[in-house]
Amino acid sequence: MDAGLRDLRHAMLTIIIVSFNARADLERCLESLHVVPPATSHEIVVVDNASTDESADAARRWPDVRVIDAGANIGFARANNIGIRSSTGAYILLLNSDTVVPSGAIDRLVAELEQDASVAAVGPRLLDGDGRAELSFGRMIGPLNEFRQKRWLKSGAIDGLTSRRQYPDWVSGACLLVRRADAEAVGGLDERYFMYTEDVDFCAAMRARGRRILFAPEIEVVHLRGRSAATAPGATQEHYRRSQLAFYEKHHPHWAPLLKLYVRMFP
């Protein structure tokens, strides 16, 4: 076996990036991971959901990036599970293709898990291209909490809300570091979610086992939101509604009929 491949097989960290028709973003993300690579031994796995913009070929420009062709647009949760099953890192970083990772950020995320055995997953503070904070954590999705989150987004208080270290119910799957043991214990991401809410559900499954989720605002990652989604806004909205309904049917079955009625009235 080639020495480099042997090292990757025993890497401590697996970085999984799901890509769909976002070549420029993917290249930018991979470039950020290579300018100053994480000191933690790692492998990078790109799962390409049948992109038509040569994303997979672009990713193969980096010799240390392993590209898995999903064969179809199978969604975020299922593609990440493929990456998880095809790797062995003790830590798994789910990373959006539209992120830019500053030097040292990943090593600091790993350090958070290494210093607190009660934490299953950790997420950083996410900033947009202009340096504005994104609400990338929160309470469990439900009618009241969704209403509260919308009020926060309109209040302009996001900077303050995202400056405090805390243990929320979930952190964003755009950049989520999780222990493999915890990811496997809950069976990976629930594949009923094509895209959206799968990260909230994933964190809920780990919390149900008595594990904690950490939001670490002192670690920052840039998130250039929605590049893949922007290519097909109608389909994106449909996927969101389907995932939202699936989430309510699983976690809030008594509210699901009302949500279905709302969706029919306000599609």
Image: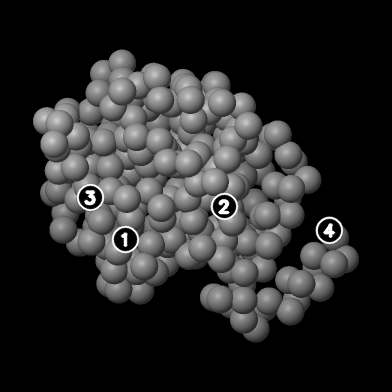
**Is residue 23 shown left or right of residue 122?**
right
Q: Earlier in the sequence, mark 3 or mark 2?
A: 2
Please state which amino acid type lies under the numbered disc 3: Thr
The disc placed on residue 267 is 4
Please state which amino acid type lies under the numbered disc 1: Ala
**Crowd band around label 1 with a 10 angstrom C-alpha radius: few (<14), some (14–19), many (20+):** many
Q: Earlier in the sequence, mark 1 or mark 4?
A: 1
Quarter of the picture holding the N terminus: top left
Of badges 1 and 4, the one in the foreground is 1
Q: Is residue 127 visible?
A: no
Of helix, strand and loop, which one carries label 1?
A: helix
Of badges 4 and 3, the one in the foreground is 3
The disc placed on residue 88 is 3
Q: Earlier in the sequence, mark 3 or mark 1?
A: 3
What residue would you read off at disc 1?
183
Say which residue appears at 22% left-offset and 47% top-offset.
Answer: 89
Return the residue found at the far front.
1
**Crowd band around label 4 with a 10 angstrom C-alpha radius: few (<14), some (14–19), many (20+):** few
Q: Nearer the viewer, residue 147 or 65?
A: 65
Residue 191 picture location, percent across and down: 51, 63
Please state which amino acid type lies under the numbered disc 4: Pro
Say which residue appears at 28% left-offset and 42% top-offset.
Answer: 14
Return the residue found at the far bottom.
254
User: Splitting the image into 4 quarters, where does residue 65 fall?
Assistant: top left
- Cα separation between marks 1 and 4: 34 Å
Q: Is residue 231 above or below residue 88?
A: above
